[in-house]
């Protein structure tokens, strides 16, 4: 069942869902070398109501299967609070090249600047395409850090994701250039510090 609508490019929770949790599913695929993502026709994104009895990732896999989609990678990328509802976002990389259908439309992936908040507050507005940008940056990190994910994605996705980098590294490089504090901080390969920096900056986490 679909639970999101479009308001100025953002997801809006349908009446009667507030106070619950939703799992947002962002299916992505490749058409040649061009990435696209799927959404239900007329809606901002695909979301299903979550019950604590079900694991969110299994809900994603079952929902995809119910629509005839087969994912090769499913990854939890972010969460956000929206109109009294907790939204848990999962990126699903689809196998095969089919995209459009009676219920879904394929939308080209566009590069976007991430939504920014403060050190202790979230962004005022988060657009779905910014959520996708953030999710693909997560996927780019996974493709480099996790050999199994890299193999499942294949060469096509590896080439696309080469253009994505985790934001903290870019942000620190910019800060170093502007302040003259020297070389950017070099983090270890665990990813733990980079995830912390994403949270502390007010980005999606």
Image (cartoon, rainbow, N blue to C red):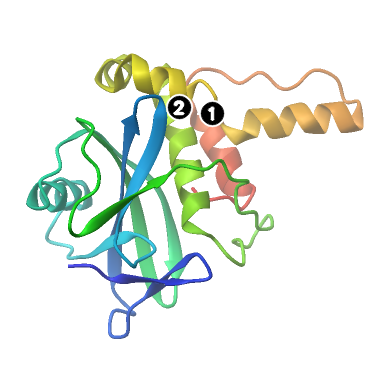
Q: Residues within 10 Å of mark 1 (few under 14, many from 20)?
A: some
- Name above or below for residue 66 compared with residue 191: below
Q: Position of residue 127 (x, y in %)?
A: 52, 59
Name the residue nearer the viewer: 129 or 100. Answer: 100
- Name above or below for residue 184 compared with residue 127: above
- Name above or below for residue 99 compared with residue 125: above
Viewer can see residue 190? yes
**Quadrant of the image occupied by residue 169:** top right
In the rendered structure, which disc, 1 or 2, sits on the residue that comes first in sequence?
A: 2
Residue furthest bottom in the image: 16
Q: Residues within 10 Å of mark 2 (few under 14, many from 20)?
A: many
Label of residue 164 in the image? 1
Q: Position of residue 18 (x, y in %)?
A: 34, 80
**Quadrant of the image occupied by residue 168:** top right
Q: Is residue 66 left or right of residue 120?
A: left
Return the residue at label 2: 140
- Name above or below for residue 87 compared with residue 135: below
Q: Secondary structure at mark 1?
A: loop
Q: Mark 1 and mark 2: span between their CA atoms?
A: 6 Å
Q: Is residue 75 left or right of residue 131?
A: left
**Quadrant of the image occupied by residue 86:** bottom left
Q: How many marks?
A: 2
Instruction: Give me the residue at 32% from left, 47% from top.
Output: 90
Would you say the residues marked 1 and 2 are in contact, meaning their CB atoms lie under 8 Å apart?
yes
Name the residue nearer the viewer: 2 or 86. Answer: 2
Label of residue 22 in the image? none
Q: Is residue 5 left or right of residue 194?
A: left
Instruction: Give me the residue at 88% from left, 25% from top.
Output: 181
Instruction: Give me the residue at 17% from left, 58% from top.
Output: 102
């Amino acid at each position: 069942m679909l639970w999101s609508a479009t308001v100025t490019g953002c997801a809006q929770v349908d009446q009667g869902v507030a106070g619950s949790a939703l799992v947002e599913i962002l299916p992505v695929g490749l058409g040649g070398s061009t990435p696209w993502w799927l959404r239900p026709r007329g809606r901002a994104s695909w979301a299903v109501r979550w019950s604590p009895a079900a694991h969110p990732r299994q809900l994603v896999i079952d929902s995809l299967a119910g629509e005839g989609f087969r994912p090769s990678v499913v990854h939890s990328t972010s969460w956000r609070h929206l109109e009294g509802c907790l939204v848990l976002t999962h990126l699903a990389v689809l196998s095969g090249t089919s995209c459009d259908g009676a219920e879904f439309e394929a939308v080209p992936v566009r590069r976007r600047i991430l939504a920014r908040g403060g050190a202790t507050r979230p962004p005022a507005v988060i657009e779905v395409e910014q959520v996708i940008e953030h999710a693909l940056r997560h996927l780019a990190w996974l493709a480099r850090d996790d050999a199994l994910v890299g193999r499942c994605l294949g060469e096509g996705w590896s080439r696309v994701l080469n253009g994505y980098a985790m934001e903290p590294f870019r942000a620190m490089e910019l800060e170093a250039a502007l302040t003259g504090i020297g070389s950017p901080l070099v983090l270890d390969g665990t990813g733990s510090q980079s995830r912390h920096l994403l949270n502390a900056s007010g980005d999606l986490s």
